[in-house]
Amino acid sequence: MATTGNKNINAKLVLLGDVGAGKSSLVLRFVKGQFVEFQESTIGAAFFSQTLAVNDATVKFEIWDTAGQERYHSLAPMYYRGAAAAIIVYDITNHASFERAKKWVQELQAQGNPSMVMALAGNKADLLDARKVTAEEAQAYAQEHGLFFMETSAKTASNVNDIFYEIAKRLPRVQPAANPSGMVLMDRPAERTGGASCCA
Amino acid sequence: MDEEYDVIVLGTGLKECILSGLLSVDGLKVLHMDRNDYYGGESTSLNLIQLWKRFRGNDQPPAHLGSSRDYNVDMIPKFMMANGTLVRVLVHTDVTKYLYFKAVDGSFVYNKGKVHKVFSTDMEALKSPLMGIFEKRRARNFFIYVQDYNENDPKTHEGMDLTRVTTKELIAKYGLDDNTMDLIGHALALHRDDRFLNEPALDTVKRMKLYAESLARFQGGSPYIYPLYGLGELPQAFARLSAVYGGIYMLNKPECKVEFDDEGKVVGVTSEGETAKCKKVVCDPSYLPNKVRKVGRVARAIAIMSHPIPNTNDSQSVQVILPQKQLGRKSDMYLFCCSYSHNVAPKGKFIAFVSTEAETDNAETELRPGIDLLGPVDEIFFDVYDRNEPVNEPALDNCFISTSYDATTHFESTVMDVLNMYTLITGKVLDLSVDLSAASAAEE
């Protein structure tokens, strides 16, 4: 649709990947511009939002981190529900984490919605000396399974904004209208005075 | 798993997940396990394949019902009072951000063989065939009294001490007949049986005020709200809260045997040959069957239909209360219906529930008056489950066991059990007026 002006898109984005692949670090870099060398396992912060302007739209990402529930395969179905995009993260210095990433892609294809935009992020790209997964191998896998691929470094910020920007560009511009929308409960409305009662 | 935890929580039902969340937020080290490979325990919502596995013994639901994953069938059907304690707990913990809700379309009551809308405005009350014209005027005076009643302001009490005056006496003062008393007690105050008549009126007045405030909150046709994708989202959301604050989650853990020392105090939980140590165990009754006793049974029917419940103005979501007196029973029967509009079924399909506290051994016969109101059904399942309550002394064994979910239509009793358990476990009273989100690091 060739509408000009500001189109606002809200998109839930979920992160998946092995413990220690750098999911939280990627988000912290993207949302806050920060990097912590020895990031503790995710505690207390697993929900962020960040707005990006792309050519024709403003995309507000609602970013869900796993909160450690991936550790024992205990991610709840609600995690995937309604997600418009996913970043599957692995660590380029750890081949097992790449194999696990493939499992997450399978899981997403089973649980997620079919039009989801999926990105594969080979993180810790600054640690070239310790590389165990080649870019070619990951690129080939991504191509075969309908993901787009980038190598990122939360430490140097390389490609971090780019991967979110690329997702924003690829999101469908027409939001599916099929699903009924609900409301989010806010704090209680201001105290009412008199008035509304059930029967009086 | 070989570490020591402050608390091990067993079972991921709603009560256990709320507690797990609250305890993790308090900074306690929590391990949360479930023998099932899904969240929610008894309070889960099942997809079609899971439903067939549980009730039909196979995983082959008929194809005409549509895709399995479009279904979220609650195992404990309830609605949330829009201004009730569960909503306050959700706001207090900021768990609301993981959930979407929609108002429930209608609230109906069964009276003299017919289904009527529970009047929600004075205009509806005037038009309602549930009361005669003179009775309406008397009722109006009573409703005004309830609306103006303020526990802390004796001027509004009209000289009556509602902690002493019984509901029967209060209603008699306004000259209301038995039929109106039945409507007020069961359809507005949501009592399950008639014991309220001889109990102090304060409870009934408070319940009526909760109904009215809940109804006013979202301007829906009922005082209820319900989460998109079903009630199974609630335990998942609180589990996420717990995980965000460091709670460790393990599903699909068989056995989960609670271990005790010589004095009978809990020392840990064993699963798959590994024992995790802990100071306290929180669980649902199924994990410690020797420390609970049966206090009743709930009979229920679950139906998949291709139409809304007849005579409910085509409501996409609705509750119908069948007061016990109308059926010649000791406790009320309830109908619930939800549909595509709350994402619990594919388009054109409706999930209806009939439930009650069981009074006989034959669920099907007992639930018949409710089932007859549903019209034709595509599929129907019957089930009876035991309600258990703990009989242990938590101060002696450090085991904190929740009570089974009752047949009430909403979550007030559920949350009361949780808040009492929280106090037993921590020695603290949960202050629901504090907004926790200020303490969360998860800000924009």
Image (cartoon, rainbow, N blue to C red):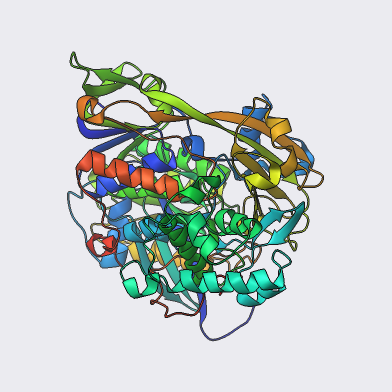
Question: Can residue B82 be seen from the camera position used here?
Answer: no
Which residue appears at 58% of the width and 66% of the height?
A172
List x then y, in percent, for residue B11.
40, 33
Which residue appears at 62% of the width and 57% of the height?
B183
Question: Which quadrant of the figure has residue B74?
Answer: top right
Report the front residue among B28 and A187: A187
Q: Identify the image quadrant of the C terminus of chain B.
A: bottom left
Report the front residue among B65 and B432: B432
Q: Going by the picture, which residue comes out furthest to the bottom?
A: A5
Which residue appears at 39% of the width and 57% of the height?
B90
When the figure is inspected, residue B130 is found, relative to residue B49, above or below; the finding is below
List x then y, in percent, for residue B195.
50, 45
When the figure is inspected, residue B159 is found, relative to residue A119, above or below; the finding is below
Q: Going by the image, does A129 lie left or right of B251?
A: left
Report the front residue among B276 and B222: B222
Question: Which quadrant of the figure has residue B329?
Answer: top right
Q: Going by the image, does A150 lie left or right of A125?
A: right
List x then y, in percent, for residue B105.
64, 63
Q: Identify the image quadrant of the N terminus of chain B.
A: top left
List x then y, in percent, for residue A136.
43, 46
When the figure is inspected, residue B138 is found, relative to residue B233, above or below; the finding is below
Which residue appears at 18% of the width and 55% of the height?
A36
Q: Going by the picture, which residue comes out furthest to the top?
A: B262
Question: Which quadrant of the figure has residue A192?
Answer: bottom left
Count all numbered tags in the image, as a single digit.
0
